[in-house]
Image: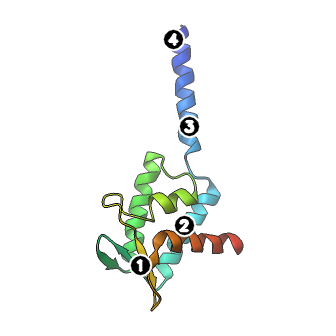
Amino acid sequence: MLRNTLFGISCLALAAIASADEPDETTRAEINQLIAYLQQSDCRFYRNGKWHDSAAAVKHLNKKYRYLLKKGYISTTETFISRAASKSSISKKDYRVQCGESDPVTSESWFSDQLAEIRNNP
């Protein structure tokens, strides 16, 4: 009886931890805005040694985001940026963003700047 009770408590604790890792509505909205900004931009996205247009970048980031969500690895907009939108999970090389004729910047910097803009101008 005690073992069953302890097992039940453990399961509830694990469920609480898992649900705490899910992004809240505000976080999901911010992530969606970041992805939409990239989609609507004239920016190029560098990953795995090649430049990609914004549509290909968005497709890749959405796929990576869904995967990381299922694993419980995205709980804040900042974790989305650091875990999904900043570098390759395989090569560990930074992603880069280049808009127009400007110099390329790390995607972490670009997404962080966009997030600050979202938060400063709701």
Checking the image for residue 17, the label placed there is 3
In contact (CB < 8 Å): disc 4 and disc 2: no
Real-space CA distance between mark 1 and mark 3, rounded to the nearest whole angstrom: 35 Å
Identify which amino acid the numbered label 2 is placed on: Asn
Disc 2 or 1, which lies upstream in sequence? 2
Real-space CA distance between mark 3 and mark 4, rounded to the nearest whole angstrom: 21 Å
Identify which amino acid the numbered label 1 is placed on: Ser
* 102 relative to 23 in the view: left or right: left
Residue sitting at x 47%, y 89% = 102
Q: Which residue is mark 1?
A: 54
Secondary structure state at the residue bearing disc 4: helix
Q: Nearer the viewer, residue 14 or 97?
A: 97
The reply to whether residue 55 is in sight is: yes
Real-space CA distance between mark 3 and mark 2, rounded to the nearest whole angstrom: 24 Å
In contact (CB < 8 Å): disc 1 and disc 3: no
Residue 32: quadrant of the picture = bottom right
Real-space CA distance between mark 1 and mark 4, rounded to the nearest whole angstrom: 54 Å
Residue 5: quadrant of the picture = top right
Instruction: Using a 10 Å C-alpha cutoff, classify the residue at mark 1 as few (fewer than 14 neighbours), some (14 to 19) or many (20 or more).
Output: many
Real-space CA distance between mark 4 and mark 2, rounded to the nearest whole angstrom: 44 Å
Q: Which residue is mark 2?
A: 32
Extreme residue toward the top, this view: 1
Checking the image for residue 3, the label placed there is 4
Residue sitting at x 53%, y 39% = 18
